[in-house]
Every structure is written in C-alpha cells, then in structure tokens.
Image (spheres, helix red, strand yellow):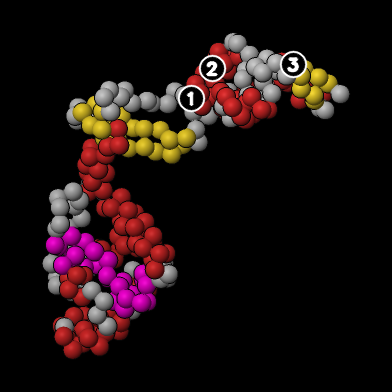
Amino acid sequence: MLTRKCPSCGVERQYKSQVYFNRVVTTNGVCHSCSKKVRPYNRVAEGVEQQALTLFQTGCNDREVSKQLGLSKSTVAGVRRRLGLSPRGRVLFKLQIENGKAVCKSCGSSRFESEFVSRPIKAGMQQSPICKFCEYERTNQRLSGSIEAYMKHKVSTLKSSAKRAGLPFDLTAAYLIRLFEHQARKCFYTGQELKTERGKGLVLNSLSVDKIVPEAGYTRENVVLCTYKANVVKNCLSLEEIKEWLPGWYQQIEKRRESQCWLTI
C-alpha cells in the first residue's frame, strides 16, 4: 500500500493504484477530501498552469496537454477554464464590468450585464461585446437583405411551433422561396404585395405562412403565403366557415386544390 502526506491537510493518505499515486506526486495534488473543499479539480504544482497556457496557445487540445504534462483530462479542463481559454486555446472575451454595467462595442451605450448576449460554447458561456439591441438590429438587417435567410429563419420558427403542437411538417426554405415566386410575391387571399422586412414593428402586409386546414399542419399541400393581416382574419376558421363567411377566399382554396400546384412548385 502506497502512502503520502497531503500537502494541504497533512494527513497520511493511502493509494492502491501506482499510476494514480505517481500522478498525485507529479502534480503535488491534494487529497480527495481537500479537493472537494477547495475546488472541483485537484491543485496543480506551481508553474504547471503556465506550462498549460503555453501549450494551449500553440493550439494543443485538452488531450494533448494532459499527455505532455501527465495530468488527467478533467484536471486540464479545469485549468483551462480557470485561465479563461476555449478548448483550442483562444482567449474568451470578458466584459469589462464597472458598477454592474459595460459598454457596447457597437453602439457605445453603457448597459447592464444582463443586456449583453451570452452564447453557449464548449468551455461554458461566452459573452458578446455587442448588446442585445444591436444584435437584434443586425439580425433584422441580415434577414431583410436576403430572401434565403428570411425563409430559413421562417422555416426554423415554424418547425419549432409544429413540434410543440405535434403537427406534421415537411417545409423547406427552398420550397417557400419557390412558392413565393409562384404567387408572384403576393398574398394568396387578397393579392396584396408581401413584405419580407423585419425590425419595423408590426407590418400588416408582412409575409406569413397560413395553414389552410389548421389541424393538418405545415405540409406543402396545406400551406399558402399570405399577409399577416389575412392570417389573423382567417385564424383557425374551418373550410365550412370560410365557405360561408369568406366565399372569395374559399374559391381560391378550391382552385388551388384542383390544380394541385404544390406538386410542380
């Protein structure tokens, strides 16, 4: 049985594994009880963190650093997080917080820390130097400037909605673009021009995807493009109700069913 005195508490500890014993001696690690009190990973010898930093900056990953320093991967990962590095050694951006606020790199406004975007990465959460308001404007500009990006975002939103409601879904961004052109960029029900701009508040003639039969889901034979206003008016009306209250719209639906245009779009 191998024994060693813990450098933190001074208690003699016994080790059954020769490999684990050699690792603890090499790293001057503390015992299991002390490691729980101090932090979730063992202490490392002086200078090891600097060696790890040098290796990370050369592009080494956790596994390569653990082999070169003789440490476990979990210990190396803990050292890396403590140094504020990503898995490939890139320095993570840290907001300069003063009195609970930081300055946005885009607009220059002083905002609370909670008003900045945080993105999940392998090393944890990384905060962006751009505030949420500027990120929102950038997203709106990106989506408004490209019909492909706009439709991809629309499909992603509808897919999540269909999944929550348990409805069938088979739409793609490419199909919605073709349908948009097939309808001559106009509302299926009213003939108004469809707008694909974002960030200007509630626009009544903005593009919306309508389910002809609400419970049939977002399938190619069951969706048309219409204005937001027309979608609100139709809402969850059944075909019988549309036939009685909105006969013009019902005729449009019947013509579409007869032509089966979704098969050729």
Q: Is residue 199 left or right of residue 1?
A: left
Q: Residue under circle 1?
A: 85
Q: Where is 198 relative to 113, above or below?
A: below
Magenta region: 204-229
- Answer left or right for 182 relative to 74: left
Residue occupying image coordinates x 26% and y 76% = 236
Q: Residue at x 19, y 52 (%)?
A: 197
> Are there few (<14), some (14-19), or many (20+) residues within 10 Å of tag 3?
few
Q: Position of residue 64 (x, y in %)?
A: 64, 24
Quadrant containing the C terminus in the rendered view: bottom left
- Say what secondary structure mark 3 lies in: strand
User: Could you tell which of marks 2 and 3 lies nearer the N-terminus?
Assistant: 3
Instruction: Tell whether label 2 touches label 1 (CB within 8 Å).
Output: yes
Q: Which residue is mark 2?
A: 53
* The magenta stretch spans residue 96: no
Q: Looking at the image, which is closer to me, 34 or 81?
A: 34
Please count the marks in the image.
Answer: 3
Q: Quadrant of residue 233?
A: bottom left
- Measured Cα–Cα span from mark 2 to mark 3: 29 Å
Circle 2: element type: helix
Q: Earlier in the sequence, mark 1 or mark 2?
A: 2
Instruction: Report the residue marked by disc 3.
Output: 5
Q: Which residue type carries mark 1?
A: Leu
